[in-house]
Image (tube, helix red, strand yellow):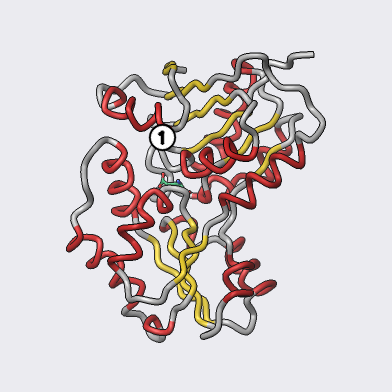
Amino acid sequence: MADDRPILLFDSGVGGLSVLGHVRKALPSAAFVYAADNAGYPYGTKSEAEIASRVPALLGRLAERFGPRIIVIACNTASTIALSHVRAALDLPVVGTVPAIKPAAIASKTRVIGVLGTEATVRQPYVDRLSAEFASDCRVIRFGSAELVDLAEAKLRGKVPDPGKMRAILAGLYSQPDGNRIDQLVLACTHFPLLADEIAVAGPPGVTLVDSGEGIARRTAFLTQGQDWPSMPKGTAVFTSDTPDIADLRPALATFGLGAVQIL
Ligand code: DGL
Protein backbone atom coordinates (compact mmCIF):
# COMPACT_ATOMS: atom_id res chain seq x y z
CA MET A 1 0.00 0.00 0.00
CA ALA A 2 1.37 3.44 -0.94
CA ASP A 3 2.63 5.51 1.98
CA ASP A 4 2.95 9.20 1.09
CA ARG A 5 4.80 10.33 4.21
CA PRO A 6 8.01 12.06 3.13
CA ILE A 7 11.50 12.01 4.52
CA LEU A 8 12.17 15.48 5.95
CA LEU A 9 15.70 16.82 5.64
CA PHE A 10 16.63 20.01 7.42
CA ASP A 11 19.46 22.56 7.32
CA SER A 12 19.99 26.29 7.71
CA GLY A 13 20.43 26.62 3.94
CA VAL A 14 21.49 24.57 0.94
CA GLY A 15 24.14 22.50 2.76
CA GLY A 16 21.82 19.60 3.46
CA LEU A 17 21.44 19.07 -0.28
CA SER A 18 24.82 17.32 -0.09
CA VAL A 19 23.15 14.83 2.26
CA LEU A 20 19.95 14.65 0.20
CA GLY A 21 22.02 13.47 -2.78
CA HIS A 22 23.15 10.39 -0.85
CA VAL A 23 19.75 9.67 0.72
CA ARG A 24 17.96 9.88 -2.66
CA LYS A 25 20.44 7.45 -4.13
CA ALA A 26 19.80 4.97 -1.29
CA LEU A 27 16.01 5.47 -1.34
CA PRO A 28 14.98 6.39 -4.90
CA SER A 29 11.27 5.74 -4.28
CA ALA A 30 11.00 8.12 -1.32
CA ALA A 31 9.26 11.48 -1.29
CA PHE A 32 11.39 14.27 0.16
CA VAL A 33 10.73 17.57 1.86
CA TYR A 34 13.91 19.61 2.09
CA ALA A 35 13.58 22.43 4.61
CA ALA A 36 16.06 25.32 4.63
CA ASP A 37 15.82 27.74 7.55
CA ASN A 38 16.99 30.71 5.51
CA ALA A 39 15.36 33.06 8.04
CA GLY A 40 17.80 31.72 10.64
CA TYR A 41 20.85 31.36 8.35
CA PRO A 42 23.70 31.18 9.22
CA TYR A 43 23.71 28.84 12.20
CA GLY A 44 27.48 28.65 12.57
CA THR A 45 27.83 32.14 14.04
CA LYS A 46 24.92 31.73 16.48
CA SER A 47 25.11 30.83 20.15
CA GLU A 48 24.40 27.36 21.50
CA ALA A 49 21.30 28.72 23.29
CA GLU A 50 19.88 30.18 20.07
CA ILE A 51 20.33 26.93 18.14
CA ALA A 52 19.06 24.77 21.00
CA SER A 53 15.79 26.69 21.19
CA ARG A 54 15.26 27.46 17.48
CA VAL A 55 15.84 24.04 15.93
CA PRO A 56 13.44 21.86 17.99
CA ALA A 57 10.67 24.47 17.69
CA LEU A 58 11.06 24.75 13.93
CA LEU A 59 11.24 20.98 13.43
CA GLY A 60 8.06 20.68 15.48
CA ARG A 61 6.27 23.04 13.07
CA LEU A 62 7.68 21.25 10.03
CA ALA A 63 6.68 17.85 11.39
CA GLU A 64 3.14 19.09 11.98
CA ARG A 65 2.88 20.58 8.51
CA PHE A 66 4.42 17.74 6.47
CA GLY A 67 3.86 14.60 8.59
CA PRO A 68 7.25 13.02 7.81
CA ARG A 69 8.09 9.38 8.58
CA ILE A 70 11.62 10.34 9.64
CA ILE A 71 13.67 13.52 10.08
CA VAL A 72 17.26 13.93 8.97
CA ILE A 73 19.02 16.93 10.50
CA ALA A 74 21.37 17.51 7.58
CA CYS A 75 23.42 20.06 9.50
CA ASN A 76 26.39 19.47 11.78
CA THR A 77 25.87 22.68 13.75
CA ALA A 78 22.23 21.86 14.57
CA SER A 79 23.03 18.20 15.27
CA THR A 80 26.04 18.69 17.55
CA ILE A 81 24.09 21.25 19.60
CA ALA A 82 20.41 20.29 19.42
CA LEU A 83 20.07 16.60 18.45
CA SER A 84 19.15 15.44 21.96
CA HIS A 85 16.65 18.31 22.38
CA VAL A 86 14.97 17.41 19.09
CA ARG A 87 14.76 13.73 19.98
CA ALA A 88 13.25 14.61 23.34
CA ALA A 89 10.67 16.92 21.75
CA LEU A 90 9.51 14.80 18.80
CA ASP A 91 7.96 11.38 18.61
CA LEU A 92 9.71 10.46 15.35
CA PRO A 93 12.99 8.83 14.40
CA VAL A 94 15.63 11.55 13.98
CA VAL A 95 18.96 11.02 12.22
CA GLY A 96 21.67 13.56 12.97
CA THR A 97 24.80 14.62 11.09
CA VAL A 98 27.98 14.55 13.11
CA PRO A 99 31.59 15.01 11.98
CA ALA A 100 33.06 11.87 10.35
CA ILE A 101 36.02 11.74 12.73
CA LYS A 102 35.80 7.97 13.16
CA PRO A 103 36.33 6.99 9.48
CA ALA A 104 38.96 9.71 9.12
CA ALA A 105 40.92 8.31 12.07
CA ILE A 106 40.66 4.78 10.70
CA ALA A 107 42.07 5.92 7.34
CA SER A 108 44.75 8.34 8.55
CA LYS A 109 48.35 7.28 8.04
CA THR A 110 49.94 10.46 9.34
CA ARG A 111 47.66 10.45 12.42
CA VAL A 112 46.88 14.11 11.76
CA ILE A 113 43.25 14.88 10.89
CA GLY A 114 41.66 18.18 9.95
CA VAL A 115 38.11 19.08 10.95
CA LEU A 116 36.59 21.86 8.87
CA GLY A 117 33.22 23.05 10.13
CA THR A 118 31.38 26.13 11.28
CA GLU A 119 32.75 28.11 14.19
CA ALA A 120 29.94 26.76 16.37
CA THR A 121 30.54 23.11 15.41
CA VAL A 122 34.30 23.06 15.93
CA ARG A 123 33.96 24.33 19.52
CA GLN A 124 31.38 21.72 20.56
CA PRO A 125 32.05 19.22 23.36
CA TYR A 126 30.46 16.70 20.96
CA VAL A 127 33.58 17.07 18.78
CA ASP A 128 35.82 16.67 21.85
CA ARG A 129 34.00 13.42 22.63
CA LEU A 130 34.26 12.06 19.05
CA SER A 131 37.97 12.92 19.02
CA ALA A 132 38.59 11.26 22.39
CA GLU A 133 36.61 8.15 21.49
CA PHE A 134 37.76 7.54 17.91
CA ALA A 135 40.94 9.55 17.35
CA SER A 136 42.73 9.57 20.68
CA ASP A 137 46.06 8.76 19.02
CA CYS A 138 45.61 11.43 16.33
CA ARG A 139 46.23 15.12 16.34
CA VAL A 140 42.87 16.69 15.46
CA ILE A 141 43.20 20.18 14.01
CA ARG A 142 39.97 22.17 13.86
CA PHE A 143 39.03 25.20 11.84
CA GLY A 144 35.70 27.01 11.59
CA SER A 145 34.74 29.20 8.65
CA ALA A 146 31.53 31.14 8.03
CA GLU A 147 32.95 32.49 4.77
CA LEU A 148 33.15 29.01 3.29
CA VAL A 149 29.47 28.45 4.09
CA ASP A 150 28.60 31.66 2.24
CA LEU A 151 30.68 30.56 -0.75
CA ALA A 152 28.76 27.27 -0.92
CA GLU A 153 25.45 29.18 -0.82
CA ALA A 154 26.69 31.45 -3.60
CA LYS A 155 27.94 28.53 -5.71
CA LEU A 156 24.48 26.95 -5.74
CA ARG A 157 23.11 30.30 -6.91
CA GLY A 158 25.49 30.15 -9.88
CA LYS A 159 28.51 32.10 -8.55
CA VAL A 160 31.90 30.39 -9.02
CA PRO A 161 34.03 30.55 -5.84
CA ASP A 162 37.23 32.59 -6.18
CA PRO A 163 40.27 30.24 -5.94
CA GLY A 164 42.41 32.89 -4.18
CA LYS A 165 39.73 33.33 -1.53
CA MET A 166 39.46 29.57 -1.11
CA ARG A 167 43.24 29.25 -0.58
CA ALA A 168 43.25 32.12 1.92
CA ILE A 169 40.44 30.51 3.94
CA LEU A 170 42.03 27.07 3.97
CA ALA A 171 45.37 28.55 5.06
CA GLY A 172 43.62 29.02 8.41
CA LEU A 173 43.58 25.23 8.70
CA TYR A 174 46.74 24.10 6.99
CA SER A 175 49.01 26.78 8.52
CA GLN A 176 48.29 25.61 12.07
CA PRO A 177 51.08 23.60 13.75
CA ASP A 178 51.24 20.15 12.05
CA GLY A 179 48.64 21.33 9.52
CA ASN A 180 50.96 20.30 6.69
CA ARG A 181 50.71 16.67 7.94
CA ILE A 182 46.91 16.43 7.59
CA ASP A 183 46.03 13.48 5.34
CA GLN A 184 42.28 13.21 6.11
CA LEU A 185 40.06 16.27 6.13
CA VAL A 186 36.64 15.90 7.74
CA LEU A 187 34.06 18.13 6.05
CA ALA A 188 32.12 18.82 9.26
CA CYS A 189 29.60 21.17 7.69
CA THR A 190 27.12 19.88 5.15
CA HIS A 191 27.75 22.93 2.95
CA PHE A 192 31.35 21.88 2.34
CA PRO A 193 30.86 18.74 0.18
CA LEU A 194 29.18 21.17 -2.26
CA LEU A 195 32.65 22.79 -2.52
CA ALA A 196 34.63 19.54 -2.47
CA ASP A 197 36.46 20.19 -5.76
CA GLU A 198 37.39 23.73 -4.76
CA ILE A 199 38.49 22.62 -1.26
CA ALA A 200 40.66 19.86 -2.74
CA VAL A 201 42.36 22.22 -5.19
CA ALA A 202 42.90 24.97 -2.61
CA GLY A 203 44.76 22.66 -0.19
CA PRO A 204 47.92 20.59 -0.45
CA PRO A 205 47.86 17.41 -2.57
CA GLY A 206 47.31 14.01 -0.98
CA VAL A 207 44.51 15.04 1.39
CA THR A 208 41.39 12.84 1.37
CA LEU A 209 38.08 14.59 2.05
CA VAL A 210 35.68 12.68 4.32
CA ASP A 211 32.03 13.47 5.00
CA SER A 212 29.04 11.84 6.67
CA GLY A 213 26.65 11.69 3.70
CA GLU A 214 26.88 7.99 2.91
CA GLY A 215 26.64 6.98 6.56
CA ILE A 216 23.49 9.07 7.00
CA ALA A 217 21.94 7.52 3.90
CA ARG A 218 22.68 4.01 5.23
CA ARG A 219 21.17 4.87 8.61
CA THR A 220 18.05 6.40 7.03
CA ALA A 221 17.59 3.33 4.80
CA PHE A 222 17.99 1.06 7.82
CA LEU A 223 15.41 2.97 9.89
CA THR A 224 12.85 2.89 7.06
CA GLN A 225 13.51 -0.72 6.06
CA GLY A 226 10.40 -2.66 5.00
CA GLN A 227 8.25 0.48 4.69
CA ASP A 228 6.01 1.26 1.73
CA TRP A 229 6.75 4.29 -0.45
CA PRO A 230 4.56 6.75 -2.38
CA SER A 231 3.18 5.76 -5.77
CA MET A 232 4.60 9.01 -7.20
CA PRO A 233 7.78 10.13 -5.41
CA LYS A 234 8.27 13.90 -5.39
CA GLY A 235 10.50 16.51 -3.86
CA THR A 236 9.57 19.82 -2.26
CA ALA A 237 11.89 22.55 -0.99
CA VAL A 238 10.59 24.63 1.91
CA PHE A 239 12.07 27.94 3.05
CA THR A 240 11.34 29.81 6.26
CA SER A 241 11.61 33.22 4.59
CA ASP A 242 10.39 34.34 1.16
CA THR A 243 13.51 35.98 -0.27
CA PRO A 244 14.12 36.92 -3.94
CA ASP A 245 17.30 34.80 -4.21
CA ILE A 246 15.24 31.60 -3.92
CA ALA A 247 14.59 32.00 -7.65
CA ASP A 248 18.36 31.74 -8.31
CA LEU A 249 18.39 28.42 -6.48
CA ARG A 250 15.69 26.74 -8.58
CA PRO A 251 18.07 25.11 -11.11
CA ALA A 252 20.22 23.62 -8.30
CA LEU A 253 17.12 22.47 -6.40
CA ALA A 254 15.84 20.76 -9.55
CA THR A 255 19.08 18.77 -9.90
CA PHE A 256 18.34 17.36 -6.42
CA GLY A 257 14.78 16.41 -7.43
CA LEU A 258 13.15 19.36 -5.68
CA GLY A 259 10.75 20.65 -8.29
CA ALA A 260 8.30 22.40 -5.96
CA VAL A 261 9.08 25.33 -3.66
CA GLN A 262 7.03 26.43 -0.65
CA ILE A 263 7.40 29.02 2.10
CA LEU A 264 6.65 27.90 5.66
N1 DGL B 1 25.21 23.35 6.98
C1 DGL B 1 25.42 23.64 8.34
C2 DGL B 1 26.33 22.66 9.04
O1 DGL B 1 26.43 21.53 8.63
C3 DGL B 1 25.48 25.04 8.88
C4 DGL B 1 25.90 26.20 8.07
C5 DGL B 1 25.53 27.51 8.75
O2 DGL B 1 24.35 27.86 8.72
O3 DGL B 1 26.41 28.16 9.34
O4 DGL B 1 26.92 22.96 10.03
Q: Callout 1: few (<14), some (14-19), or many (20+) C-alpha neighbours within 10 Å? A: some
| Type of the residue with mark 1 | Gly
Whether residue 132 sits left or right of residue 53 in the image: it is: right
Residue 103: which quarter of the image?
bottom right
**Secondary structure type for disc 1:** loop
Whether residue 99 sits left or right of residue 206 in the image: it is: right
Q: Which residue is mark 1?
A: 40
Residue 243, position as x, y percentages in the image: 29, 23
Q: Is residue 94 above or below residue 232?
A: below
Q: Who's the residue at 49% across and 58% down the image? A: 188
Q: Is residue 159 above or below residue 126?
A: above
Residue 166, position as x, y percentages in the image: 25, 61
Whether residue 164 sits left or right of residue 83 in the image: it is: left
Whether residue 121 sits left or right of residue 199 in the image: it is: right
> 124 or 74: which is nearer to us?
74
Residue 90, position as x, y percentages in the image: 71, 30
> 42 or 200: which is nearer to us?
200
Tally of numbered discs: 1
Q: Who's the residue at 70% across and 33% down the image? A: 89
Q: Who's the residue at 42% across and 18% down the image? A: 261
Q: Is residue 28 above or below residue 164?
A: above
